[in-house]
Amino acid sequence: MLKSALTTRLCHLDFFFYLTMSLANLASMAALLGATAASPAFYPHELTERAGISLWPAQSFVTADFHPPTFVVTKNGEELEQGLIFITPALENVGNSLSSLGSLQATGTTIVTDDGQLVWQGPHSSVVEVEASTDQVFNITTNLMVQELDGEPILTHWIGYGSDTGRGYGSVAVYNTSYSQIYTVCPELDIVYNNASFPSAPTCFVDLHESFVTPSGSMIISVANITSFDLSPINGPTEGWVYDSQFYEVDIKTNEILFRWSSVESGIPITYTKLKLGEGTAGNGTRDSPFDWFHVNAISSAGDGYLVNSRHCWTTWMLDNSGTIQWKIEGNNTEGLSNFTLPTDGLFGAFNPLENGNTFMGWGSIAKLKKFGPNGNNDVRLAMQFGGKDLVQSYRAYRQSWNATPIANPTAVGRNSTAWMSWNGATDHTAWNIYAGTVKTDLSLVGTVQRDNMFEVSYPLPSDAQFLQVAAYRESTWLRNSSVVTVGPFSHPVDVGDEGDECDA
């Protein structure tokens, strides 16, 4: 969980960092970021990726149609505290790169171990064709993380329409430790958006940048609203249009709106933007191409107030509980606190201080993750990478504790005298018992295999086995059975029912 309310997050092309403990940490954090970002490692498959053969080497399984990345993992031998890695692998250019990837099952909500072994894969991306739009629009998932609600761990992620211009309209899914979706954050909002950008009208309007659960159990969400605005102070039209970056604090369980803040209504002048009208994806200030002058990256609660960060103003503001600005940290060093500016190549993706004094970092558009010890940038305890620069990314990345027992049962496949087994999302099972026989109601234990932190394991079956069932164990404690399936040359399991009680040993 968060160790301090002073939390600033600027992610993906956003430069994500935490102010944890005190503003003095800015100096050491800047040194760490500067040192590690200067010479990013190249992935061994860089050349084949650039040739369009493959965006990333992918894992594949018999028991599930998942294709998460194959990670290149380096460790220095120092002991790592328990924890899992939460990412949302995605393509930098979904439409142009989909044929190279081969399966969108490789994208989306993903939990892996420090060895790059899959733990859970949830909702994934899909391309949406929109004839009237020049944007590439796609259903995406992002910002997967563990948070806390009512004293219990929850898993949250954003899902909805996204585009290449860095905005989204969707909702936030909230899961318990059995991966049951217990809430959907989708407040009723009066939002103006570009109709031509989406195949159908969005039903939820939460932006992809923020889904922060506060200590009081509410959620802070970001929203992008199109509104008219005088752009003459920046040499634009008097009757111009902008994206008004807003944030709302909402009740997770009821979607009641508790607080609203608007960048346009805040009194921050339009001249504060560091972006030029019509530059890149900034927009030219028309109704069809609003100027993205503020671009909220991250918001969090801070005491009874809020911290809000703007990517295009290079500034973080502290607000009181009425939304009034109290102070700011600015990117041009006007207050002597920092000298950060927009990372134009998007190298920075996550700065995640851990409770033992270590730090976990992700690089956003470079699919690279590192865990540093307390001795700074030369103390790299763990390094992981799964793709090349400008090709793939994980919008945000976290290393957190998570213990889960899925509501869904384990999956078993019997194929060519081999039993294959997995349990998507389970974190605590250590071994499998394998039961087989010629009659589905009379199966016998034929072996036990250790999980060894693998997503999927296999075990040889007797040559006459016709039916198969597996049981997951934590040491000697039975957890759950799979269904009974037939054994044969099938590409998918044929379920013949009878989950039953604990299999007889």
Image: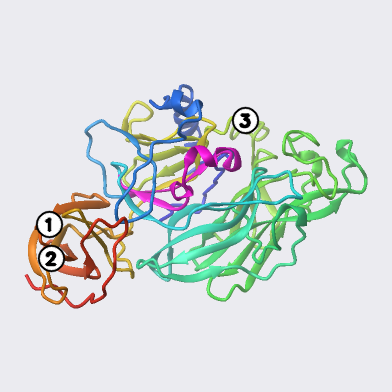
The residue under the point 48% across, 64% down is 215
In the rendered view, would you say 423 is above or below 481?
above
Residue underneath mark 3? 344
In the rendered view, would you say 98 is above or below 27?
below
In the rendered view, would you say 494 is above or below 46?
below
Residue 24 in view, yes or no: no
Q: Position of residue 46 (x, y in %)?
A: 44, 25
Residue span colored magenta: 84-113
The earlier-in-sequence mark between 1 and 3 is 3
The earlier-in-sequence mark between 1 and 2 is 2
The residue under the point 50% across, 37% down is 100
In this rendering, position of residue 139 left or right of residue 109: right
Looking at the rendered structure, the kind of residue marked 2 is: Ala
Placement of the C terminus among the 4 image quadrants: bottom left
Looking at the rendered structure, the kind of residue marked 3 is: Thr
Q: Position of residue 159 (x, y in %)?
A: 55, 58
Q: Position of residue 101 (x, y in %)?
A: 48, 40
The residue under the point 12% across, 61% down is 475
CA–CA distance between discs 1 and 2?
7 Å
CA–CA distance between discs 1 and 3?
55 Å
Residue underneath mark 1? 461
Residue that protrudes farthest toward the right in the picture: 238
In this rendering, position of residue 338 left or right of residue 289: left
Q: Are marks 1 and 3 in contact (CB under 8 Å)?
A: no
Q: Are marks 1 and 2 in contact (CB under 8 Å)?
A: yes
- Does the magenta segment cover residue 102? yes
Residue underneath mark 2? 436
